[in-house]
Image: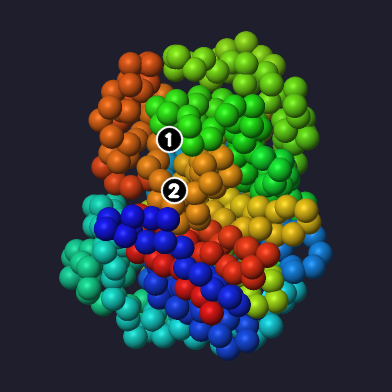
Amino acid sequence: MRDFFRPGRGPTLAGQAAIATSHPLATAAGLEILASGGNAVDAALAAVAVQCVVEPHMTGIGGDCFVLYAPASGEVLALNGSGRAPAAASVARLRELGVSTIERTSPHAVTVPGAVAAWTKLHRDHGSLPLERLFARAIAYAEEGYPVTARVALDWAAEAPLLARDAGAKAVYLPGGRAPTEGERHAQPLLGQRLSEIAREGASAFYLGRTAESLVRFLNGLGGLHTLDDFAAAVDGADYVTPIVTSYRGYEVYECPPNGQGLAALMMLNVLAGFDLSEKLPLVERVHLHAEATKLAYHHRDALIADPAHLPYPVEQLLSDEVAQALRGRIDMERAGAPVLWHEPEHRDTVYLCAVDRDGNAISFINSIFHAFGSTRLDPETGIVLHNRGASFNLVEGHPNAIGPRKRPMHTIIPGLLRRGGRTVAPFGVMGGHYQAAGHAAFLSGLLDRGLDVQAALDAPRSFAFNGVLEVEPTLGEGVIAALAARGHDVRLRGTPLGGGQAIWIDHARGVLHAGSDQRKDGCALGL
């Protein structure tokens, strides 16, 4: 039981349905749908549509989406709603244009957005209420305005210099020449129009006709290679795919397959499964072990994970006991090490939500424009800010993740799902860009190794070993930080919290839902 004298909160307990998001208005919109008879898919779509308005730096209809959906009876479904590069895009073509790196704000970083195609396919196949009903709150907030929350205001202000460089973004996101502050109202009427059109006409409202024509014209004006055919090809471009699974402490952990980095999360769990991570393990040992497992898994991620048509090794091989044992053997508990591929010598912003409905259907849902405000390229005619997921591509000919015609880039966004004995136990997810795979492993370890409830597991101090640096939140404590440095880690204190997250634990025995929402964001968990 938590200490009621200290700041914090426990999980939200509910008997029928629950939803958790990173923004209170999105959670309220989803709960409203659940209360009016909508299912988990309906609630998720209502919530994410609101988030596209009220968390504009984190997500939008100009981004991508991945979903794990677990019906109360039946198998888990995975939906890949990530977009593809233009047909004309290739390493050779970009080199001809003088491009050596795909920068954050480059038009070549904009793949054809896949979120709307994923939303409409998911709704068509599993929704129960009309999109007009589901998008009503989002449309109202876009047209009439909404109050900016504290964490959104903090992140928004940090991006103001970059937003000022794009005329469309400046007009919409810097009204009066500055970022809105906490409590100020902000509106995006053009975005409201686009949501209304999608609600009425479906995906064709985005990928065909005036909106697509405007987006292509806008991107071409920036030097992009996009065509109307590229957009038209995406209208039904979201794909149902087979989830990938590993076992951890007697539970089955589900992730979406590549091109997402869920494979890295499962590889981490396979490595960690060989260690005792119970509460008796000292914190410095726990952080060190997570750091070493992270470095190994991410080294493989960056070298091997890409569009599934270009994977150099089958997923099953990378999740094998052979690979896990080889990686586990490279961890020195006394010293920070360099990452190594398992069979070779050494060489060189997002929203998540989950919902469970009264029938027991569960959804794990993530939507992203990648960096804060994505590419920061906003088409002034449509009001759509475009993501920059194509910045994940590289320009190394022959690399699995090299840019190519109609190719999907490696993605950082990953929804997660936990099951046991054929029953869903928890939809969960962690935001934070590259941190997400490491965040999944840390969250599940807190839940299953340490016995924390979902809220405590989300709130626990975080660390992330990436690009040769071990980033830590100051809540780890000075003694732990010093001990990590003594082991050879290049430790850096985080100036802002590391990611966010939501989860819902389903207690089947007692018929109770335990829902948590990360205190690092403005959101909350609510239930019926």
Q: How far apart are marks 2 and 1 (CA)?
A: 11 Å
**What colour scheme has been applied to the protein in the rendered image?**
rainbow
Q: Can residue 511 be seen in this view?
A: yes
The percent coordinates of residue 469 (x first, y second) are 38, 27
Residue plotted at (31% across, 60% down): 4
Residue plotted at (69% across, 83% down): 128
Camera-side residue: 140 or 406? 140
Amino acid bearing label 2: Gly
Camera-side residue: 277 or 213? 277
The percent coordinates of residue 77 (x first, y second) are 74, 60
Q: Residue 432 carries which label?
A: 2
Please tell me whether mark 1 sits on a helix, a strand or a loop.
Answer: strand
- Number of numbered discs overlaid on the protein picture: 2
The percent coordinates of residue 489 (x first, y second) are 37, 21
Residue 171 in which image quadrant: bottom left
Q: Is residue 88 visible?
A: no
Residue contact between numbered discs 2 and 1, judged by CB atoms under 8 Å: yes
Camera-side residue: 100 or 239? 239
Residue plotted at (59% across, 27% down): 275
Residue 106 appears left or right of 508 = left
The percent coordinates of residue 251 (x first, y second) are 70, 46
Q: Name the residue under label 1.
A: 464
Specify which label sits upstream in the sequence, 2 or 1. Answer: 2
Amino acid bearing label 1: Phe
